[in-house]
Image (tube, rainbow, N blue to C red):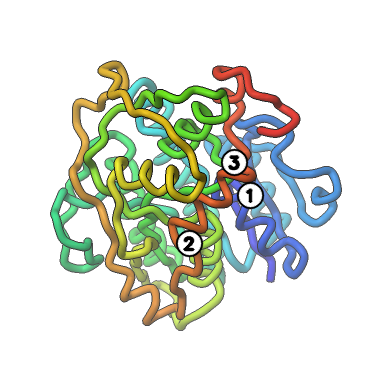
């Protein structure tokens, strides 16, 4: 299949590209926001790489017209919440304008897969269900994803292509591009700190391994019957949730590590939902997907090969030969 992946050098995007690149024709559209070394040199011949910002309609149109994708998997976005709040203009232009550009170019015989987020849901203490749980984002990122969903529905009907909206929950594992929770913890541990400074400790989240996230996007892109002009919405998570304290306890047990926790007032979020967990019944029923990796699997991988974000490597003076 001919598959165009936006954000294909990002966190989930790189895992997805690696999953597909040896069996399919892959075009990665990415603005190189996270540097030039996200892939090994020997991997680059397996896919076409286009250095394009999705807000550049003219360049994006040329790639889509030349490549003629059968599937578009749209992952590119500004998604690190603190950055979204600091730069709302950049977030809105990238996440909304960029999405509209891509939708306006999508061929009618193409399946369009949109990476939305569990952040679009209203807070609740039970698993979120696609058709039943109310939507009420709590941050700019969530608002841009909810608006993106509306544009996906509009353009799918107007242009006649099939669309799947994937509400992705918290992705974890090696190769993160932003300093989210687990990369921050492991960066501090790898720098020999034994008092881990963190922000909010009590919120519970549904953590999905990046490898399962990649498998999930490929499942909805390649399986199931989704007629042209129709829209399907699914959650992508695990139906399990853990607090920060529970994750730290697992890291201690699995890694045999001893450390203390210090709550840092500077890291506290003023607004943070207490629970976020996916009901994944629909993606399993429609696209035959279920997670393979447990949170224990993820933690074990990160202990041995965390592949941390470059700015955390620099911040904690870690060896760039080991962590990238």
Q: In the displayed structure, would residue 312 be above or below residue 27?
A: above
Mark toward the start of the polypeptide (2 vs 3): 2
CB of mark 1 within 8 Å of CB of mark 2? no
Q: Say which residue label 2 marks.
A: 113
The image position of residue 11, as x and y in percent, is 56, 45
In the rendering, which numbered label is found on residue 58? none
Q: Quadrant of the N terminus?
A: bottom right
Q: Residue at x 75, y 70 (%)?
A: 23
User: Residue 229: where, in percent of width, then height?
Assistant: 40, 72
Q: Which mark is residue 306?
A: 3
Q: Is residue 236 left or right of residue 293?
A: left
The residue positioned 41% from the left and 31% from the top of the image is 259
| Viewer-side label of 3, 1 | 3
Is 243 situated above or below 139?
below
Q: Which percent across, then down, holds residue 52? A: 64, 37
| Residue in view at x 31 percent, y 61 percent | 240
Residue 324 or residue 168, whichever sits in front: 324
- Inspect this view and state whether residue 108 appears: no
The reply to whether the C-beta atoms of the residues labelled 2 and 3 are less than 8 Å apart is no
Q: Secondary structure at mark 2?
A: strand
| Residue in the picture at 49% in, 45% down | 101
Q: Nearer the viewer, mark 1 or mark 2?
A: 1
Mark 3 → mark 1, Cα distance in angstroms: 15 Å
């Amino acid at each position: 299949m001919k598959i165009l992946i936006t954000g294909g050098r990002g966190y989930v995007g790189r895992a997805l590209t690696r999953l597909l690149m040896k069996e399919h024709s892959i075009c990665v559209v990415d603005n190189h926001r996270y540097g030039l070394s996200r892939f090994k040199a020997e991997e680059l011949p397996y896919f076409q790489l286009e250095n394009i910002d999705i807000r550049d309609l003219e360049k994006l149109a040329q790639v889509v017209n030349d490549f003629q994708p059968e599937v578009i998997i749209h992952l590119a976005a500004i998604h690190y919440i603190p950055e979204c709040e600091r730069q709302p203009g950049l977030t809105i232009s990238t996440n909304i304008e960029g999405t509209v550009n891509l939708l306006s170019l999508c061929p009618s015989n193409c399946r369009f897969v949109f990476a939305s987020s569990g952040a679009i849901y209203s807070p609740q203490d039970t698993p979120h269900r696609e058709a039943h749980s109310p939507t009420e984002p709590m941050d700019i990122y969530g608002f841009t994803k909810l608006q993106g969903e509306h544009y996906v529905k509009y353009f799918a009907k107007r242009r006649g292509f099939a669309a799947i909206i994937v509400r992705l929950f918290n992705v974890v594992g090696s190769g993160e591009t932003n300093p989210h929770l687990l990369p921050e913890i492991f960066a501090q541990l790898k720098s020999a700190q034994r008092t881990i400074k963190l922000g909010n400790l009590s919120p519970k989240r549904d953590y999905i391994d990046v490898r399962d996230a990649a498998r999930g996007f490929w499942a909805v892109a390649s399986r199931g019957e989704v007629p042209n002009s129709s829209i399907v919405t699914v959650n992508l998570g695990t139906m399990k949730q853990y607090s920060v304290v529970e994750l730290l306890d697992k890291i201690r047990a699995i890694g045999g590590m001893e450390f203390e926790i210090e709550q840092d007032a500077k890291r506290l979020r003023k607004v943070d939902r207490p629970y976020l967990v996916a009901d994944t019944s629909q993606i399993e029923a429609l696209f035959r997907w279920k997670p393979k990796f447990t949170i224990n699997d993820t933690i074990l991988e990160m202990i041995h090969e965390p592949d941390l974000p470059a700015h955390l490597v620099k911040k904690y003076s870690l060896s760039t030969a080991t962590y990238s």
